[in-house]
Image: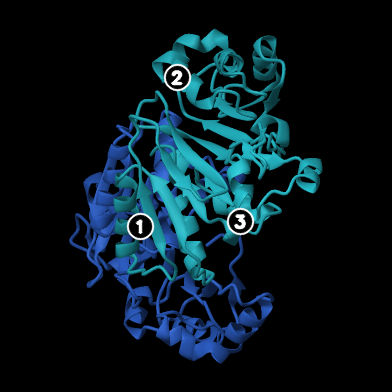
Chain colours: A cyan, B blue
Amino acid sequence: LLLLDCGEGTQMQLRKSAYRFQRISHIFISHLHGDHYFGLIGLLNTFHLLGRSQQLNLYGIPPLIDLINLQLDLSRTTLAYPLVFHPFETEIPSVIVDDGEITVSTIPLNHRVPTCGFLISEKPEKRKIVKEFLAKAKVPIHYFDRIKSGEDFTNEDGKVFPNREITEDPPLVRSYAYCTDTAYHEPIIPIIKNCNLLYHEATFMEDKAADAHAKFHSTAREAAVIAMKAGAKQLLIGHYSARYKDLDHLLDEARKVFPNTLLGQDGMMIEV
Amino acid sequence: LLLLDCGEGTQMQLRKSAYRFQRISHIFISHLHGDHYFGLIGLLNTFHLLGRSQQLNLYGIPPLIDLINLQLDLSRTTLAYPLVFHPFETEIPSVIVDDGEITVSTIPLNHRVPTCGFLISEKPEKRKIVKEFLAKAKVPIHYFDRIKSGEDFTNEDGKVFPNREITEDPPLVRSYAYCTDTAYHEPIIPIIKNCNLLYHEATFMEDKAADAHAKFHSTAREAAVIAMKAGAKQLLIGHYSARYKDLDHLLDEARKVFPNTLLGQDGMMIEV
């Protein structure tokens, strides 16, 4: 399980969820505003008190680990499990996780402090060899991986079978882009291109566009424009200003630009 | 309003309470274990976001303010209100608040890290001049304060009226002693002597006395012994280990030694 950001009370919310929160193996902190990380030290401590032994991987900007270590030192706590910190820079996108099944990349955002979103992508599988061909042609086993990687096949008689005729496309890979907090920022578009699900903050509506820009936040319409330009399949908005009591107005504003928009809410589960 | 300690999620709990939490003017942090202060930075930020302007007084050991300042710096936040930090030492008891109506004093405790409890006491009012005497005797106005402060009164004829005959005792002052976290620690007894309400931690029961001592915590029985020896009028226990599902066992253990014991629970309100 991956956890993206960790505001105050996250551990209480996790306890209400269907997931065993001890299975979280990676935590990513987008930036050091309180609503994105004040719950981290508490969660790390709770893992410790529950006797966790598995490694926890933490990703954030360099000062994050200083803050964690200071708090652990002040309470004279030595964590019972390995906490491995992976610092990242917020200026250029980079791959910070590649475990063979998924990659996680940073998405530099435009906020008041150094901030990155995260793109979680499945890694493409290799091509599939057509079953009927395998049954007919005598393909040596050592050739399988070469064909799956895209090579043509030449049999004992010198006959060439073009790869595209003897293989099928692998299953499509899925990706989730998490972009918060940020002003409207077109440089993220090529990074999140064609993602299956885009979470994009929508702190304000267009009536408060000036506030949004001044505070390096986005409007619901701007989130939708990014989703449309990036060719996202679905948009999830969130991070609403407390001024909006009826969130359907934000949803309506976004849907006018990008119809397949969902209103992010506490405890929501979405299958990608 | 005074707030004693501030664990993660305190601001959420405060929002559920009957009190306007913006009225909190003093926050006291007993020690730097997470369950006593991880919610502080979030509460300070929320006051800022809500546009607080009144001064907030914060009391704790010196490193607390470094931690707060580091987190404010990282989020580039300049608080909208004056936050005044009052550091205290944990070795000797001292008066840290004296506002004319109440005093707050530290109570050095015996825990794994530097820790103080807090004693909140009303200041005694002056003595009251007996109404019938005032009606009879011609007491010059400038003499009132001297009589209230305990002086005898001598009238124009040279007749002396002893103070104890012309005044009454002022109303009794009330005090609340908050002692957490701590091992059984008799040096606190003279400090909390005769308090109206004693909150004393009771992390364990006597069956786990060895654990309690090893971890610098108390048992329910030990809390009750302190209450009895200090002549407290009422004992409130709390800070229970998660191992105890039925807290009535802790209450029973304490009541065997000190019958007027209450079981501290979330959201409880007690009139002193």
Q: For numbered disc 3, what is the local secondary structure?
A: loop
Specify the subunit that label 2 lies on. A
Q: Nearer the viewer, mark 3 or mark 2?
A: 2
For the residue marked with disc 1, what is the amino acid? Glu
Please indicate, yes or no, whether residue A23 appears anywhere in the rendered image. Answer: yes
Residue assigned mark 2: A183
Residue A153 is situated, as x and y percent measured from the top left of the image, at: 64, 39
Q: Around disc 3, counting alpha carbons within 10 Å, would you say few (fewer than 14), some (14 to 19), or many (20 or more)?
A: few
Do the residues marked 2 and 1 share a common chain? no
Decide: is B37 above or below A127: below
Q: For numbered disc 1, what is the local secondary structure?
A: loop
Specify the subunit that label 3 lies on. B
Residue assigned mark 3: B267
Decide: is B25 above or below B176: above
Which residue is at 30% across, 63% downward?
A74
Residue A87 is situated, as x and y percent measured from the top left of the image, at: 34, 46
Q: Nearer the viewer, mark 1 or mark 3?
A: 3
Residue assigned mark 1: B125
Please indicate, yes or no, whether residue B17 appears anywhere in the rendered image. Answer: no
For the residue marked with disc 3, what is the amino acid? Gly
Residue B212 is situated, as x and y percent measured from the top left of the image, at: 47, 84
| Residue A62 placement, left or right of A3 | left
